Image (spheres, rainbow, N blue to C red):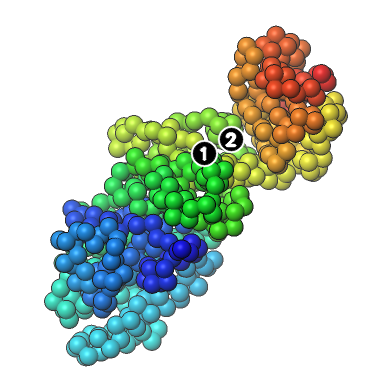
Amino acid sequence: MKRLPIGISDFKKLIENDYYFVDTSEMIAEIYREAADIALITRPRRFGKTLNMSMLRYFFDNRFETSALFTGLKISEDTEVMKEINGYPTVFLTFKDIKDNSWEMTRENLKALIAELYGEYYGLLKKNLKDFQWNYCHRIINGIGSDVDYQRGLKNLTEFLFEIYKKPVMLIIDEYDVPIQSGWSYGFYDDVIGFMRGFLSGALKDNNCLFKGVLTGIYRVAKESIFSGLNNLSVFTILEKDYSEYFGFTEDEINDIFNHFGSEYDLKMKNDLKSWYNGYKFGDSTIYNPWSVVNYLRFKELKSYWINTSSNDLIITVIEENLHYNSDFRLAIENLISGKNITKTIDNSASLRDLQTKTDSIWSLFLFSGYLKQESYVLKKGKYECKLNIPNEEVLIFFQDTVLSWLEKSGERTLFSIVKPLLNGKAEIFCENLKNYVLNALSYHDLKGEPENTYHMILLGMFAHLTEEYWIKSNRESGLGRYDICLKAKDKQNYSAIIEIKADPEAVKDAMKQIDEKAYLQELTSEGYTRIMKIALGVDGKRIETIAELM
């Protein structure tokens, strides 16, 4: 039986060591027949970009003899494309490890990466190039070239290989935007953009030495002019159908995995996979997160594997800053955590710089990074109006924890001490704790916007850490209407709660009356719950009136 590959992004190693491979080899044929000379494919991190680029490299690179690697794969049935195997000089470059926190370190690591690339062809270049060309290569390899030398490095290498082999070059660039993201996070954005613009556009624009160029990343980063003037470029984001099934696992591929490993995995694990790690929408394909799936099947524990693989600092910073100052954003996050859809305009050419000035660019960041999914969309004036929601349990927990962290930073007492009385059926003490928290810990900035919506989100954030013991439901139907919040204990011997909020302190009695008249407790009582608290809140700014009753 084959082994599950965890963290293996080298195609040759994966095949030769008999790891399980979800066959994406038909992508090779699509790239070969791609109408555009340059294809940029954007997908979230850890969705198989590097492995697929490695597969392309081993197929096309004329330095290898790799037909055995593709025996039995789907591409082996395509006789036209198989004639091209190992038929092109190929340049493969990945930026996935350029994650430094200063421009000085990034610049040195970029130079070292280019020097290493030239070093792969050391003997070939030294033997076949003219003296002045080799002198240039010597400066690159030995780290003594100028910044201009390194910026021209990719273009010059493709020209050298074309001259030597008399064949056009296959250019594969993986995770091109990783150093750009670091530049944004650590304050050297303009420096890294300036370098990458010259490095990439020089190699891609009007380069007659190329057969094809394939790039991957998370973002298009179009407005920084990295790809300006590239008339031969096609961009395939998660909103396009092309290449949609090659990054992440489809439902059929999950079924194949379970069939292969037989009795080792059961139906419960399959259902857990669906709720925790499924739900992404790439083009018209529904996709499972491959990193989380493989780790869950290996360790058999439901965890946030993908969320915890690398820094979420950029996403967390954007969420916390906008929670503080942007009431519309707070409402949208509340709706998402509550399981609702939100409709936002998505610009697939948005830049990281837009995060400072354009609110909608936040949703583009979340979508293309994998923190939201598009349920559906309509194309209007070149932009996408998307219906968005949270894809699965793993990402939902991330949003809940981030809101919880923001709330904790906003106050002096821990949120657990505020909520703890609810666990013991002491609703009145909880209400007093809430009043003191709002009065002493929150600012008027935190309470901007519609009072009912603002307090709704604050409470959901407070309850986020209770998910192991409670189902936290929001705006769900029960009885004759829709309650605001329900804390439903997973153990019926524990206390549960129904909470109704009114945007007027004087309307607190109406809120309690609504709980009774609309029979909001029906869902709980019909399932045999007997320990139920009814909590009514009337709110406006920092003023709160409360009524609490224990059934």
* Residue pictured at 65% horizontal, 23% vertical: 484
Q: Earlier in the sequence, mark 1 or mark 2?
A: 2
Answer yes or no: is residue 540 visible.
Answer: no
Of 221 and 391, the residue lying toward us: 391
Residue position for label 1: 390
User: Where is residue 530, by image quadrant?
Assistant: top right
The percent position of residue 246, horizontal first and vertical second, equals 35, 52
| SS of the residue under disc 2 | helix
Relative vertical location of residue 129 with respect to residue 176 in this rendering, above or below: below
In this rendering, position of residue 76 left or right of residue 526: left
Q: Residues within 10 Å of mark 2 (few under 14, many from 20)?
A: many
Task: Report, in whole angstroms, how far the alpha carbon at label 1 lies from the one at label 2.
Answer: 8 Å
**Image quarter of the C terminus:** top right
Q: Residues within 10 Å of mark 1 (few under 14, many from 20)?
A: many
| SS of the residue under disc 1 | loop
The percent position of residue 228, horizontal first and vertical second, equals 27, 55
Residue sticking out furthest to the front? 263
Residue position for label 2: 337
Task: Tell me the amino acid under the disc marked 2.
Answer: Ile
Of 265 and 245, the residue lying toward us: 265
Task: Tell me the amino acid under the disc marked 1.
Answer: Ile
Could you tell me if the residues under marks 1 and 2 are in contact, i.e. CB atoms within 8 Å? yes
Relative vertical location of residue 332 with respect to residue 406 in this rendering, above or below: above
* Residue pictured at 29% horizontal, 66% vertical: 70
The percent position of residue 300, horizontal first and vertical second, equals 59, 54
